[in-house]
Amino acid sequence: MDGRQRQKRGADFELNSDFISSMPAEIIENILVRLPIKEAVRTSILCSKWKSLWASISDLVFTEKISESELIRSVDNVLLLHQGSILKFELDNYELTCEEMINRWLLFLSKNGLKDLRLSFNIYKDCKVPSSLFSCNKLERLEISACTINAPQCFQGLNLLRNLNLGNCHLVGITIEKFVSGCPLLESLTLFEFVEHGCLAIRARNLTHLDLLGITCTDLLLETPKLTYVSIHFDYMPHGFLNFGLASDGCHGKLLRSIGALSNIEELDIGSKFFTYLASGLIPEKLPVTFYHLKKISIYLDGCSEGVDTALCIFQKVPNLNTLCLTVPRQIIWEEQRITSISFLERLEVVVILSFEETVSMLGFAKFILSAAPQLEKLVIDEWDINKLDDGMGFRMNLASLPRLSSKAVIVFDRSFSY
């Protein structure tokens, strides 16, 4: 390399160094919070201005797959050198089990304005989160998975919490009812693989989003007047599952006592075992409330006569339905004369049918939808199901020949259902 090349390279390096050192502090922090904490620390070698900036970033994320001892050393060092508020702390490690360390970190974080806490552990290890968790009283978001959570004897609640996500967690010293009731601002609740020995009661006046996925309980009680999104999937059909819903009037059926109270919902997703439960009770001729806001329904239709009646009971009180997703694993007993009102079809634009095995009744259902939905745009059929049929091509041709009320209606064979 001659002298002129060395001179030019030195000038380029100086220019780049000046550019890095002259960046505004808020931009530098915006870069640092997007890096793994290990890489954020390494940026201190870039220039003198960056030397200690990593120590003041507000988001600390530890997701490296390292041993427990390495993780403890890393977190301890970062917290020791950190300056200023810590708004987010995320830890995802399958090796950590040391309750003493978790307790020490939580106590430190509780004094530094923590708003967002996310902890994920190994489900096969007995990891315990101590009661110091509840000293983080400025939390707005809390996500914890695969551990035991110990509550303090005198639970004061988390008054600022808006988002709660618990997966494979076991609560000690507190019920989920008390936990949720102690969070008056809670807007979103997700429980995944959650076991409640007895009634799973959720009372949250500001809750708008509810996900119950893989739930095990003997009863369910919802007092959530502002819910707009509801997804309920039970892990199994519990024996002795007798009472559900807001109303204590035992003469009313399960469907009436549950769905009939959620008048503000915009999207409803009912899993197979929960829908089976709804269909097993007294089905009213009509629900007392009209779901004017409900735009999307995803439902598992088990094919029995009671299942169809239950679905129709819901559909006929949904005048503004836009999207209907049906999972139909067995033969569906479908009779048009059982439909007393087709108002639910007036604004229907998308219908998705999954997992069907029997073609005659499915053609009957498709014929009914295509001939009665004036604004239908798409009837989506699972392409995988078509390919499993002995005469898949014939089924496609029969579908294509069906008359359509809507001039925009098309039949789509697809495997990606982002509707």
Image (cartoon, rainbow, N blue to C red):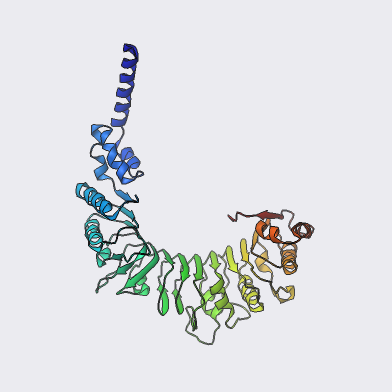
Outermost residue, left direction?
Answer: 80
Q: Residue at x 27, y 71 (%)?
A: 155
Where is residue 218 drawn, in percent x and y? 45, 80
- Quadrant of the rendered image containing residue 288: bottom right
Percent position (x, y) of residue 127? Answer: 31, 64
Give coordinates of residue 280: x percent, y percent. 58, 81
Residue 375 visible, this angle? no
Q: Quadrant of the N terminus?
A: top left
**Towards the viewer: 187 or 122:** 122
Q: Position of residue 232 (x, y in %)?
A: 50, 69
Residue at x-position 51% and y-position 66%: 231
- Residue 373 in view, yes or no: yes
Q: Quadrant of residue 33?
A: top left
Position of residue 325 in the picture relative to residue 214 (left or right): right
User: Where, quadrant-wise, is the C terminus in this rendering?
Assistant: bottom right
Q: Could you say which is closer to the camera, residue 288 or residue 31?
A: 31
